[in-house]
Image (spheres, rainbow, N blue to C red):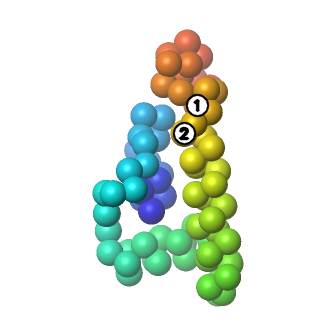
Amino acid sequence: YQYLIRYKRGEDLDHFLFLSKRTEGTQKECLKLLLEFCGRHNPSWTELSNLTHFLNFQLSKCEKSVFCSPALGEDFQGF
């Protein structure tokens, strides 16, 4: 939710890090956002679950990647 809501607002995600202890939004807002980004008209709970697992996996890998680090971003602006 933290990444998706910032992406929807058009915020810069380059320097954002997920904080598991920070709660943002309501359950209703989270579900609405997942439905919006799912890409399916009437997704099942399994499809929503798969989407959240995929996003969690990919975004956690991205945060740990040297290629997505703020230090590298300073050297390669615009990528």
Residue 77: percent from the left, percent from the top? 55, 19
Q: Quadrant of the C terminus?
A: top right
Q: Residues within 10 Å of mark 1 (few under 14, many from 20)?
A: some
Q: Residues within 10 Å of mark 2 (few under 14, many from 20)?
A: some
Residue type at numbered disc 2: Glu
Point out which mark residue 63 bears.
2
Q: Report how many numbered discs are placed on residues in the image.
A: 2
Q: Is residue 75 visible?
A: yes
- Observer-nearest of 40 and 47: 47
Secondary structure type for disc 1: helix
- Observer-nearest of 60 and 48: 60
Q: What residue sits 38% from the left and 81% below the top?
A: 28
Residue 8: percent from the left, percent from the top? 46, 56
State whether residue 46 is above or below residue 64: below
Residue 76: percent from the left, percent from the top? 59, 16
Residue for badge 1: 68
Secondary structure type for disc 2: helix
Residue 49: percent from the left, percent from the top? 62, 75
Q: What residue sits 47% from the left and 78% below the top?
A: 31
Q: Quadrant of residue 63?
A: top right
Q: Which one is earlier in the sequence, the residue at label 2 or at label 1? A: 2
Residue contact at pointers 2 and 1, CB within 8 angstroms? yes
Q: What residue sits 47% from the left and 53% below the top?
A: 3
Q: Quadrant of residue 41?
A: bottom right
- Calculate the distance from the C-alpha at mark 2 to the C-alpha at mark 1: 7 Å
Point out which mark residue 55 bears.
none
Residue type at numbered disc 1: Cys
- Observer-nearest of 57 and 13: 57
